[in-house]
Amino acid sequence: MSDSIVIIPSYNEKENIEKIIRAVFSLEKSFDILVIDDGSPDGTANIVKNLQNEFASRLFLIERAGKLGLGTAYIAGFKWALQRDYGYIFEMDADFSHNPADLPRLYKACFDEGADVAIGSRYVSGVNVVNWPIHRVLMSYFASVYVRIISGMNIKDTTAGFKCYRRKVLETLDLDKIRFKGYAFQIEMKFSAYIRHFQLKEVPIIFINRVEGVSKMSSGIFGEALWGVIQLKLESLFKKYNVEE
């Protein structure tokens, strides 16, 4: 068993799921994978099950009854990982917008460089986004600027979804109280770690828009993020937190 688990939520990712799994398992650094499938009607889960015959000790699957939200998928994955001995727990998309070859760099930021949360950042060294329409780039970039101003986090890519957590971060957070399910989930997780004085470190990556399959992004989840960060900041002013020892 590896010390690291990569959690990959999936919904209708039959074009990508086998490729992304094989790409992760081909890395020199060993990673296990947990796929959280939300009842994909295209047979994504069946592809994973077939691959489990080949990767029995490294590939795991949780099947859920329907689209329950990105945030709840990751929370389910975090709880599963914490019931086992993983020291480093990753979030990654199934569609190759996050390059599996960057996983060892995120791991190194935590294992060797002292970060508690390593963030695969699109904006820490300019704007490193490929194949996104310009309106989408601008919306994402300025959403991150807005979140940074409101929250006080010195993070350039506050909405990034490619991350590595040290185990102690997820053990410290009350995962049952993470409320947001969509885009704002990524902000809430970073902010929850930040206000508990965990060390967040951005690792520059190149984000490439999916080539195969259909994007699950919508304008509504941007709205959740814009209002959610105000709510998170206001609540933080009046609450006491279990701070990392």
Image (tube, grey):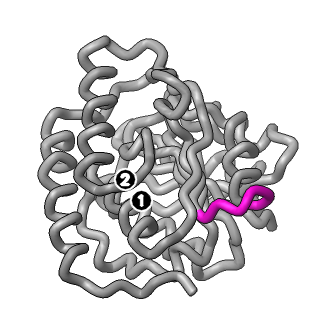
Nearer mark to the viewer, of 2 and 1: 1
Q: Is residue 53 visible?
A: no
Q: Amino acid at mark 2?
A: Gln
The amino acid pointed to by label 1 is: Lys
Instruction: Please identify the quarter of the rendering in which residue 99 is found.
Output: top right
Residue 215 in the image, given as x and y percentages of width and height = 33, 29
Tell me whether circle 2 and circle 1 mark residues in contact (CB < 8 Å).
Answer: yes
Say which of 120 and 208 sits in front: 120
Q: Is residue 147 above or below residue 124?
A: below
Q: Residue at label 2?
A: 186
Specify the segment rendered in magenta. Answer: 111-116
Are there few (<14), some (14-19), or many (20+) residues within 10 Å of tag 2? Answer: many
Q: Nearer the viewer, residue 98 or 24?
A: 98
Left or right side of 113 for 37: left
What is the chief secondary structure element of the magenta stretch? loop
Residue corresponding to mark 1: 190
